[in-house]
Amino acid sequence: MNARIDEQASGEAADIERMMLDIGTRARQAAAVLATARREPKDLALMGAARAIRSSVADLMAANAADLAEMSDTASDAFVDRATLDESRIEAMAAGLEAIIELDDPVGGIIARWEQPNGLQIERVRTPLGVIGVIFESRPNVTADAGALCLKAGNATILRGGSDTHRTSSVIHRCLVGGLEDAGLPADAIQLVPTRDRTAVGAMLRGLEGAIDVIVPRGGKSLVGRVQDEARVPVFAHLEGLCHVYVHAPCDLDMAREIVVNSKMRRTGICGAAETLLVDRALAGSHLKPLIEALIAAGCQIHGDEDAQAAAFAVEPAVEADWTTEYLDRIIAVKVVDGLDAAIDHIRTYGSSHTEAILTDDRRAAKAFMDGVDSAIVLHNASTQFADGGEFGMGAEIGIATGKMHARGPVGLEQLTSFKYCVHGNGQIRP
Amino acid sequence: MNARIDEQASGEAADIERMMLDIGTRARQAAAVLATARREPKDLALMGAARAIRSSVADLMAANAADLAEMSDTASDAFVDRATLDESRIEAMAAGLEAIIELDDPVGGIIARWEQPNGLQIERVRTPLGVIGVIFESRPNVTADAGALCLKAGNATILRGGSDTHRTSSVIHRCLVGGLEDAGLPADAIQLVPTRDRTAVGAMLRGLEGAIDVIVPRGGKSLVGRVQDEARVPVFAHLEGLCHVYVHAPCDLDMAREIVVNSKMRRTGICGAAETLLVDRALAGSHLKPLIEALIAAGCQIHGDEDAQAAAFAVEPAVEADWTTEYLDRIIAVKVVDGLDAAIDHIRTYGSSHTEAILTDDRRAAKAFMDGVDSAIVLHNASTQFADGGEFGMGAEIGIATGKMHARGPVGLEQLTSFKYCVHGNGQIRP
């Protein structure tokens, strides 16, 4: 009996594997068309998709209501909130597509150009990456955001959304495909995996026999961790943003107070939120207590080392785990360090290579910190909450990457491209 | 008895795994020092290594003689030749190190810089990649080349050379370490895996628990294939160079003849050598026979389709396998195609995304070909044998990559770096 069920299950798994390979083949074919598509049809497709989303409010709300009705009672409020659409969120989704229309098309841009002594003219030209797999949790708007950003960079996309919002994602996907078809682009340029079965995710992580060039996970730490562990293709992601602010002498206290509070408290749930405050012993006497008090006044809990505990009554003792915890909450770990090298060591030991800031009036110390810290983003006298593609002027981003290969930091349109060398000769042969 | 041998073997394997993890940890520590090392000590180390190599001719020759003496009788002449050192090859190795000294240090270079409306100054700054694992066959000079190039780009290197030339590589490695120590850089910046056991390769391919950032295989197709299949870290490589030359009407016949013969015959054993000639039907009548005759006159065998067979008596019939064979020899496959799209289709179906050339006087056709062909290098009216970092003006290269992530085409110093964002503020917080 069990054997028969297993057989049936593995039969279904084999069907899904076959279906996924077919999706990969069709994405690869669409990518070949997109690779030479000009800007106009891509923008037309986004315009059509935005229009379709605006005229599908009723369908979207109905699909979303059906998704929410089936959602488990144990789902957290935050989870349900992320999964929920309303009219303003639908309008924001359409406006997001229009914002991507405004961005320059990176494809075909010449990154570098030079001439060799033999007259060969060499150009390094931006090209699409190819096929991007996006695996996301139950935030239906990612369907539109990710699909549109990949399309603008000339890539085909395979989207695998959270099963809890599959109906909602399907309606959004239908709007995107409508835009593609209106613009004369292949409908397979943006595909949504039509099954909730998890076999599909495994197949994507193995790359669909070479069809997927890169995977972008969008979601919490467990999703990203699974993707990073299991993917056999490159991944653009950050596992967590364990961001540090280091205050180094001399440092204007008012500036430090503003930046520390902003880094931690502006929004505590984003990856650029500070999780650890390092205060140099050289100014601990003057700065530690005011900084801690400002954080407490802003509603933050402090887990501190002995120095921090001595500075304010409300500070709870920090344990080892505090230095490696991404709270994503109104909590910060605070430690006094003995100089710049100790700060860099702490960050190297406990950090996640995402974003760190040094606050100081000493420009040489700032340079040493920025050289020595091996993170995607290092800031001097600015809030860690600037770790964001929009704030970098890149327009929309599909996420932030902490890997060192290809894309690092905010992953915007340019980071979703590759390049090729175009060499122009007039008969040169190699001696 | 067998069980005991297995136990012993697995005990040894565990020892090797432990040793490799230790090598990884030490490489990571050395990389942290190299990350902020200025140009001078790195160049000093290369100078010292070149000096040491020149003064170690006797040791190198003795070690090499011992390696060669133990080599299997079944080793091919080409294999033995690659493994053999003589005085001129030793001098070339030292001179190669000196050539790397002359190259600019890529680390710290500012790739892009812009200011945001809020006054934040954002710089994208080149940084080392970290730790590079190099797995190579029995070409002892790779020890020096690869170690030096990685060092100049600020990376620590773990070298795993072919076991047949382990003694020779060890002497070269000793010279490199002498240079590092003279320059005050960590000796662990360039490590040579001290065992011939293959367990070490497997451990490197799994990344030594995050210690290795990228693997560069240097060797034949079977080595590269194994590395690409098994590596759990990014790989810079090309599996093969199945390069095409496509002749499109109108095209000057003299130019075509020179470039076709050069692309195939200048050196047949390199990855940029042409393996397939595609002739457009529109000029097959005028060009096919002269091109085939020029190749035959240069000593090349032709495996051709029916049109090619009709053009010259000596043409052997091509079979399907000819379109996918990287001959690396005095053989070329020849086919007549019906237009530009058919040429692009053929290349997409059979090519290896390495290097392709179009020969034509029609600039629009050249542009369409270069846009449509998804290879690392596409040339117009120039020989495929220019597919080389030196010919691109990049100085030394560690290889050519056909992947689309991070490095594509020749992998020189710049391609051995990553980058970070350095953001300079004066108190900015995010609203």
Image (cartoon, coloured by chain):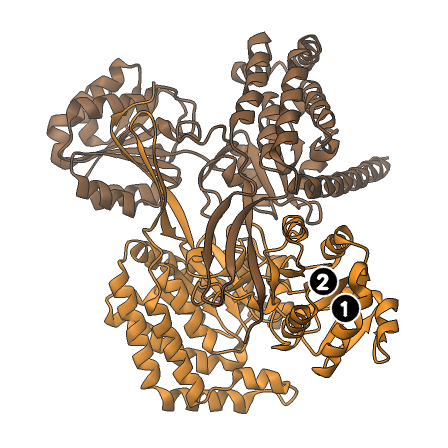
Chain colours: A orange, B brown
Q: Chain of mark 2?
A: A
Residue B123, horizontal then vertical, whole percent:
51, 53
Rendered image: mark on residue A214: none
Q: Which sits in the foreground, A172 or A364?
A: A364
Q: Quadrant of residue B321?
A: top left
Residue B238, horizontal then vertical, whole percent:
47, 37
Quadrant in which the N terminus of chain B is drawn: top right
Quadrant in which the C terminus of chain B is drawn: bottom right
- Other-residue count near label 2 (Cα within 10 Å), few / some / many at <14 / 14–19 / ≥20: many
Q: From this view, report whether residue B130 is shown above or below residue A29.
A: above
Q: Which sits in the foreground, B180 or B39?
A: B39
**Closer to the eye: label 1 or 2:** 1
Residue A114, horizontal then vertical, whole percent:
35, 36
Residue type, mark 1 in image: His
Is residue A178 something one can see in this rendering? Answer: no
Question: Does the CB distance between marks 1 and 2 fall below 8 Å?
Answer: yes
What residue do we see at 37% from left, 72% from top? A99
Query: From the viewer's perspective, is A142 left or right of B343?
Result: right
Element under label 2? Answer: strand
Rendered image: mark on residue A287: 1
What residue do we see at 31% from left, 58% from top? A34
**What residue is disc 2 on?**
A247
- Other-residue count near label 1 (Cα within 10 Å), few / some / many at <14 / 14–19 / ≥20: many
Residue type, mark 2 in image: Val
